[in-house]
Amino acid sequence: MDQARLQRDTQPAAAPKRARRNGKREQLIRVGVAMFTEQGFHSTSIDTLVSIAHVPKGSFTYYFGSKDEYALAVIDAYGAYFNRKLDRVLTDKRHTPFERINRFVEEAANGMERYAFRRGCLVGNLGQELASLNEGCRKALLEILVEWRSRLQACLEEAQEMGALRKEVNLADLAQLFWYAWEGAVMGAKLEKSKMPLLVAGHAFIAQLKALKP
């Protein structure tokens, strides 16, 4: 693991001294998001986290108490970040609902490419590692997935109201289908080191939507 690279990727912009003093918790969370999306929970030690974050080890136990508690904070931060991303893209009235979904797919594919396909989805990574081991983390990850479905379903409801989807189409099922397919595509992109699995999944979903036009 290239710690110098991770330090560059997670280092915040310069801030006033007081903000820097009060930002140790936030910096640890930023590093956690990067590390957990890249190499997972169990492969990331507390020593590595505090080293990359440039904070004393005592700060970790002060803010979080345990690695499990820290994982919950990282999950919460990742969920909030991704919800903001979805809100920005999926509610953009300058584009049709189908165009918004396609923009999300392309932005996400470009994002994975930017990090050389090292980083995947934190929900997918931790879901596989922790769902059967940590009930608190499982519930937190599921809550994020439910929020993603809700946001996509709202976008699809707009398409339905505009006449782009038949009234009888079950939008909740479509939203669920997209995210399950998407998590598999993220894994495929990491394995193949290519955007293609993401683009294939996204474009196939859009094609399916267009086939459901009245």
Image (cartoon, rainbow, N blue to C red):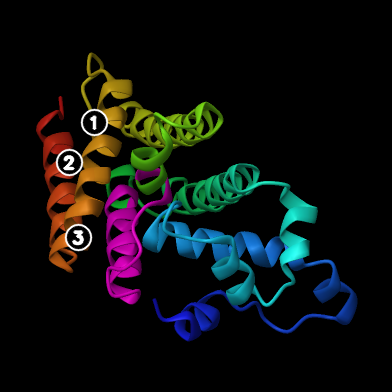
Look at 35% across and 74% down and name the residue there: 115
Identify which amino acid the numbered label 2 is placed on: Phe
Q: Quadrant of residue 172?
A: top left
Q: What kind of element bears circle 3? A: helix
Residue 177's disc number: 1
Badge 1 crowding class, 10 Å Cα cut-off, few under 14, some 14 to 19, many 20 or more, is few
The relative height of residue 56 versus residue 213 in the rendered view (above or below) is: below
The relative height of residue 59 versus residue 133 in the rendered view (above or below) is: below
Q: What kind of element bears circle 2? A: helix
Residue 189's disc number: 3
Identify which amino acid the numbered label 3 is placed on: Ala
Earlier sequence position, callout 1 versus callout 3: 1
Task: Report x, y in % for residue 33.
Answer: 52, 59
Q: Distance of mark 2 from mark 1, alpha carbons? A: 9 Å
Task: Report x, y in % for residue 186.
Answer: 25, 53
Q: Nearer the viewer, mark 3 or mark 2?
A: 3
Q: Quadrant of residue 17?
A: bottom right
Is there a contact, CB below 8 Å, between mark 2 and mark 1? yes
Task: Report x, y in % for residue 122.
Answer: 42, 50
Residue 141's disc number: none
Q: Distance of mark 1 from mark 3, alpha carbons? A: 18 Å
Task: Report x, y in % for residue 66.
Answer: 66, 46
The relative height of residue 15 versus residue 140 in the rendered view (above or below) is: below
In the picture as drawn, the residue positioned furthest to the top comes out as: 168
Look at 78% across and 80% down and name the residue there: 15
Earlier sequence position, callout 3 versus callout 2: 3
In the picture as drawn, the residue positioned furthest to the right comes out as: 18
On whether residue 116 falls in the magenta region, the answer is: yes
Badge 3 crowding class, 10 Å Cα cut-off, few under 14, some 14 to 19, many 20 or more, is many
